[in-house]
Amino acid sequence: MVKLRARCILVGDAAVGKSALSQMFSSDGSHIQKNYSMTAGVELLVKSVNIPETSDSVELYIFDSAGRETFVETCEKMWGQPSVVCVVFEISSLDSFKSCSRWLERVRAHCNGLQLPGVLVGNKSDLASRREVETSVAQEWAQEQGLQYHETSAKEMENCDAPFLSLAQAFYALYQDRRQMIQRLG
Amino acid sequence: MLNTALSSFGAQVVLATSSDENHPPESMIDGNTETFWLSTGMFPQEFIIRFPDNMKISVISVHSFNVKRLRIEKSTQTDAEKFEVIAEKEFEQTEGNLQTNEISLDGSNATHLKFLILSGYDHFVSVHKVGIQA
């Protein structure tokens, strides 16, 4: 049995639903945020994710970072060395999707060249009638960047665990890979 | 004595911030470089080795992989407390073989040694063997 620990940096434009998504995930759906409250700094949420078919788990330290440009610099100081990244946009805003590459670069700049497993999340899937970003377009960009793509609706409690489970699994796979590599060195 | 297992004369690992049951902290003091303790994510990482008596230490050797910055502190108390920094070193990165480093000290006494791994060349780092010379 092993418990891994991963520093998960959660970024994306303001008001795309980062806090709603991470709170929905970390509270198992018991914390529903009805009104928007802007995150000004970084909020830390911790949740353990079990890796299916093993007795192992990954404890995610989710750094929910403000999306508003004014606060970004302060937030970056608290990121430390990221283990995994979660970039969020809303499917009803093309602008928020276009910002994703900038967010990803920002986080990667803190990695000292280390591999950074990540996911791209298209939130607000409940707003399908106002969709501005097609699933296939988001999927393609995610693939280019080596990210897994998930669509969620924090409002409808739809699929909110999937991105975090996928991050935990990617980090776990990296650990197993390194473990085997080191085993061969000894 | 650098090659002797620390555990053979009663040393123990009394704290380690990571634990994978396949790679217990005791792997660092069994004198064998094939067994290792593996960190399980995030920095810093820390482990403390306790000696049965006050030990005079002139050299500490560390076999590791992907450790970048390491700080060593010592305590001369019966309990693991009141640590003072005795060395800090940046290890060079290796590929395909372990990092082997020796850290010379002034032959001071210690009951405990605390190893703080401040950063790594990867998300996960391993320590295979810690040896000391009186």
Image (cartoon, rainbow, N blue to C red):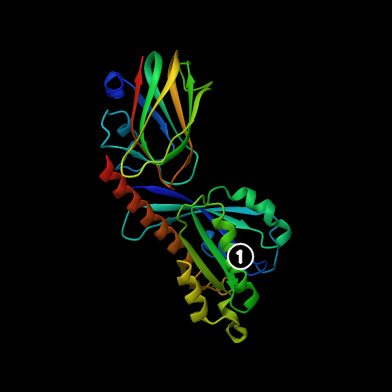
Above or below A21: residue B125 = above
Q: How many marks?
A: 1
* Amino acid residing under circle 1: Arg
Residue reaching furthest to the right: A70
The answer to whether residue A30 of the structure is visible from this angle is no
A26 and B43: which is toward the camera: B43
Q: Quadrant of residue B3?
A: top left
Above or below A22: residue B14 = above
The answer to whether residue A130 of the structure is visible from this angle is yes
User: For the residue labelled by badge 1, is the local secondary structure a helix, a strand or a loop?
Assistant: helix
Would residue B4 be found to the left or right of residue A94 on screen?
A: left
Q: Which residue is mark 1?
A: A102
Percent position (x, y) of residue A123? 57, 73
User: Looking at the figure, which quarter contains the N terminus of chain B?
Assistant: top left
Q: Quadrant of residue B131?
A: top left
The chain letter under disc 1 is: A
What residue is shown at x 54% (from left), y 65% (from top)?
A: A29
Above or below B82: residue A13 = below
| Mark 1 Cα-neighbour bin, 10 Å: few <14, some 14–19, many ≥20 | few
Percent position (x, y) of residue A67? 66, 62
What residue is shown at x 35% (from left), y 21% (from top)?
A: B132
Percent position (x, y) of residue A1? 33, 47
Percent position (x, y) of residue B108? 45, 13
User: Looking at the figure, which quarter contains the C terminus of chain B?
Assistant: top left
What residue is shown at x 57% (from left), y 70% (from top)?
A: A154
Would residue A181 be found to the left or right of residue B68 on screen?
A: left
